[in-house]
């Protein structure tokens, strides 16, 4: 739409025509903000109102260079007004959060880890002594390769690889059952 008539109406002091054109533009601008930037209807209305509070004095002072591009100017102004509203609203909740006592973020994960450790300890007790020694070695040296395991236990590399996967499978199955 061409809103150059709005520029003419404001500059000539024709408030009736200016109000009518602003009323026609408001739903378009609100829908733009709601659909393109995710504004709520109330925030969109506030942003459009703030945009008009900025644009109308610019028109009165003859600072609009291209009256035919007024719609694009109003869309951009509405978007900027909305982002300013959002920015200003975000400051308050952050201040409230700072004043509240904080809790360690990892508390729930610590509880889960403790529960998993308890289950793992129960599963370890169910293993044969030789498998427990194997698991202890794996915990002590988590990056150990099959060669390192074979050398430590005096077994072949193939046997080390098989034992490692067997013990991991046994522990995995046991923890799943708990």
Image (spheres, grey):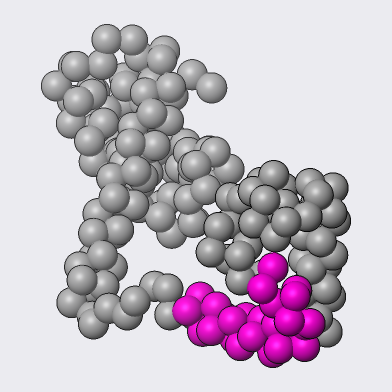
Q: How many marks?
A: 0
Instruction: Point out residue 52 in the picture as x, y percentages from the top left corner.
Output: 30, 38
Residue toward you, 81 or 131: 131
Q: Is 110 covered by the magenta stretch?
A: yes
- 32 vs 85, nearest the viewer: 85
Q: Residue furthest left?
A: 61
Q: Magenta stretch: dominant SS?
A: helix
Name the foreground residue: 75 vs 150: 150
Residue name at image x 67 percent, y 73 percent: 133
Residue 163, compared with residue 31, is above or below; it is below
Which residue is more in the foreground, 167 or 100? 167
Residue positioned 52% across, 48% down in the render: 38
Residue 26's image quarter? Answer: top left
Residue 5 falls within the magenta-colored stretch:
no
Q: Residue 142 is drawn in which quadrant?
A: bottom right
Q: Position of residue 49 (x, y in %)?
A: 32, 47
Range of magenta residues: 109-134
Point 41% across, 13% down: residue: 68
Vertical comparison of 36 with 94: above or below: above
Is 43 situated left or right of 156 in this image? left
**Which residue appears at 26% of the width and 65% of the height?**
94
Residue 107 vs 62, above or below: the answer is below
Residue 178 seen in the figure: no
Q: Quadrant of residue 125?
A: bottom right
Evaluate whether residue 63 shows in this view. Answer: yes
Image quadrant holding the N terminus, namely top right
Q: Residue furthest top?
A: 65
Residue 36: % across, % down: 54, 38
User: Residue 146 placed where, x, y %?
Assistant: 72, 47
Decide if residue 132 is on the left or right side of residue 8.
right
Left or right: 126 in relation to 141 = right
């Amino acid at each position: 739409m061409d809103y150059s008539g709005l520029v003419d109406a404001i500059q000539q002091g024709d408030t009736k025509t200016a109000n009518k054109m602003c009323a026609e533009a408001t739903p378009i601008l609100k829908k733009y903000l709601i659909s393109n930037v995710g504004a709520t209807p109330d925030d969109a209305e506030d942003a459009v109102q703030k945009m008009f509070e900025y644009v109308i004095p610019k028109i009165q002072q003859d600072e609009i260079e291209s009256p035919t591009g007024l719609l694009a100017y109003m869309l951009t102004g509405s978007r900027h007004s909305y982002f300013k509203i959002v920015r200003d609203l975000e400051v308050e909740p952050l201040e409230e959060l700072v004043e509240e006592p904080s809790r360690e973020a990892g508390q729930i994960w610590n509880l889960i880890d403790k529960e998993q450790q308890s289950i793992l300890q129960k599963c370890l007790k169910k293993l044969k002594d030789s498998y427990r020694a194997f698991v202890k070695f794996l915990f002590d040296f988590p990056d150990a390769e099959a060669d390192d395991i074979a050398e430590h236990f005096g077994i072949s590399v193939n046997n080390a690889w098989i034992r490692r996967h067997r013990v991991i499978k046994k522990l995995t199955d046991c923890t799943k059952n708990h």
